[in-house]
């Protein structure tokens, strides 16, 4: 892919929007409005995706069936609730490049991380370490440290953090590989963010997986900022498990049900210890209510509870839109949008720097802008209807999301940003 060339000026943004084959998808979402009733510039899809207009219809259907059918809705709703979560399996598998047996939509992200670690983090005196990136999302750090302690090890000796080189903000691919080469034999689990939440760095999942597996490590990824943002091929890349949430790029709504991938090679690993619940039990005999747990093959065997139908309904609305748009086309637009934003920001260079990698293959939609002046700028922009977010200590994050952001959004954002940035 040769680097795109862009032009300064509003006309160019209008031309790009007119040519954009995905532009019409914007109309399928509610765009937040400012106090004066104007459309805001929403660049926060990395934190909470916007509401598909169709979400309401999906939700209302389930409310209606609950009202009209009560418990019978489990079997006689328009979309029976018993197998409801399976309505999401095919589209989820396609989105993350997995076989249907490898994915399930359940729980929330941190819960899934713990469930997966109960099965896949099996430390021994010779191999007890966990490798993560420095500055991983706090919930992941807490989860990992608590798992280490749960097994009577100490984070100070069992948690290794990949760190950028002095003066750099992202971690170099070769440094990841050499650390795995050196320490791999003592590492039980490698868990990296697919895309780091703070820097926007997109890790090379297939290479890290290969390097980790060569050393006998379990390799996993937290895809919270990768799913729906970059195309994934989890089955081929081969990590042992992956987890993600569905309210960021997937637009499933606040606190929406999360996702989980377990590679097919573990689909019949009946010997793995796991926390069990009735929804993970073989569905053919689930309602015989017997005393012995007999898990389903694949990711579904890790389910605990019957899922929250009202939370799954809006996710279905969004996944329909993803299927229509196609992840590959979304990624093509995303690469352009982000590069365009970077181009305009560099043109207006001031007291800030972009910490996200500039290579399109090492980032998704997000750009992280390091500011010297603190969060005041973020708040001033918010007051003008420009919605990005602030992450301590010094990072302003924005993402132009190809499903609903336009080139004009990006143009207008940079206008506001440079005017507010004294
Ligand atoms: C957003 C995010 C979370 C949030 O966890 P929840 O369990 O969904 O509250 C955790 N980890 C990462 C990497 C995230 O980006």
Image (tube, rainbow, N blue to C red):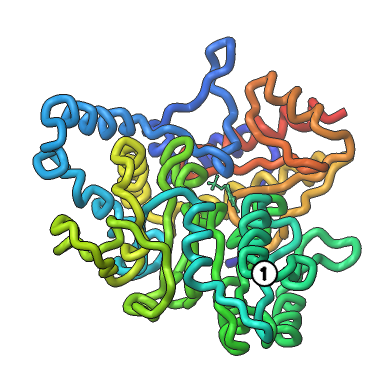
Q: Residue at x 66, y 34 (%)?
A: 388
Q: Nearer the viewer, residue 223 or 18?
A: 223
Count of picture labels: 1
Position of 259 compared to 59: left or right?
Answer: right
Residue 230 visible in the picture: no
| Residue farthest to the top, as pictured | 36
Examine the rendered structure and indicate whether residue 189 appears above or below residue 12.
below
Residue 419 place in picture, x, y as percent: 79, 26
Q: Which percent across, then down, holds residue 88?
A: 29, 52
Please report the residue visible at 57 percent of the width from the left and 54 percent of the height from the top. Answer: 335
Residue 377 visible in the snapshot? yes
Q: Nearer the viewer, residue 343 or 68?
A: 68
Assign the C terminus to one quadrant of the image.
top right
For the point 57% across and 24% down, the residue is: 40
Task: Answer with the quarter of the image where residue 125 lies.
Answer: bottom right
Q: Which residue is at a point 70% across and 70% down the rendered structure image?
A: 153
- Counting from the top left corner in percent of width and height, residue 32 is at 51, 24
Q: Judge the density around disc 1: few (<14), some (14-19), many (≥20) Cα neighbours within 10 Å.
A: few
The percent position of residue 307, horizontal first and vertical second, equals 32, 46
* Residue nearest the observer in this picture, 368 or 417: 368
Mark 1 — residue?
A: 152
């Amino acid at each position: 892919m040769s680097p795109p060339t862009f032009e300064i000026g509003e006309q160019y943004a209008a031309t790009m929007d007119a040519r954009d084959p995905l532009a019409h998808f914007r109309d399928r979402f509610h765009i937040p409005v400012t106090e004066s009733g104007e459309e805001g510039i929403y660049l926060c899809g990395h934190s909470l995706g916007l509401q598909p207009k169709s979400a309401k219809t999906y939700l209302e259907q389930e409310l209606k069936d609950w009202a009209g059918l009560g418990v019978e809705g489990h079997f006689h709703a328009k979309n029976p609730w018993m197998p409801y979560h399976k309505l999401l399996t095919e589209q989820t598998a396609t989105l993350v490049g997995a076989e249907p047996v490898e994915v399930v939509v359940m729980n929330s992200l941190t819960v899934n991380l713990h469930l997966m670690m109960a099965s896949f983090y099996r430390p021994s005196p010779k191999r007890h370490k966990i490798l993560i990136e420095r500055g991983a999302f706090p919930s992941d750090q807490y989860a990992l440290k608590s798992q280490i302690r749960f097994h009577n090890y100490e984070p100070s000796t069992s948690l290794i953090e990949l760190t950028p080189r002095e003066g750099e903000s992202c971690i170099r691919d070769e440094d990841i590989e050499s650390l795995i080469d050196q320490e791999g034999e003592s590492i039980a689990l490698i868990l990296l963010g697919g895309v780091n939440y703070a820097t926007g760095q997109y890790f090379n999942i297939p290479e890290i997986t290969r390097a980790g597996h060569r050393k006998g490590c379990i390799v996993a990824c937290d895809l919270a900022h990768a799913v729906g943002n970059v195309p994934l091929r989890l089955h081929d890349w081969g990590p042992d498990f992956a987890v993600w949430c569905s309210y960021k790029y997937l637009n499933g709504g606040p606190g929406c049900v999360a996702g989980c991938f377990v590679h097919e090679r573990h689909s019949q690993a009946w010997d793995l210890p796991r926390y069990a619940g009735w929804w993970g039990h073989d569905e053919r005999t689930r309602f015989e209510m017997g005393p012995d747990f007999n898990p389903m093959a694949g990711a579904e065997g890790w389910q605990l509870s019957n899922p929250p139908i009202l939370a799954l309904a809006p996710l279905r609305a969004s996944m329909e839109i993803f299927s229509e748009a196609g992840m590959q086309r979304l990624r093509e637009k995303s690469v352009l949008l982000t590069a365009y934003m970077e181009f305009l920001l560099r043109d207006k260079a001031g007291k800030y720097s972009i910490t996200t990698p500039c290579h399109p293959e090492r980032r998704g939609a997000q750009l992280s802008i390091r500011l010297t002046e603190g969060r005041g700028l973020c708040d001033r922009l918010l007051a003008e209807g420009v919605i990005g977010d602030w992450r301590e200590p010094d990072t302003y994050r924005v993402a132009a999301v190809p499903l609903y952001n336009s080139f004009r959004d990006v143009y207008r954002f940079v206008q506001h940003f440079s005017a507010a940035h004294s």
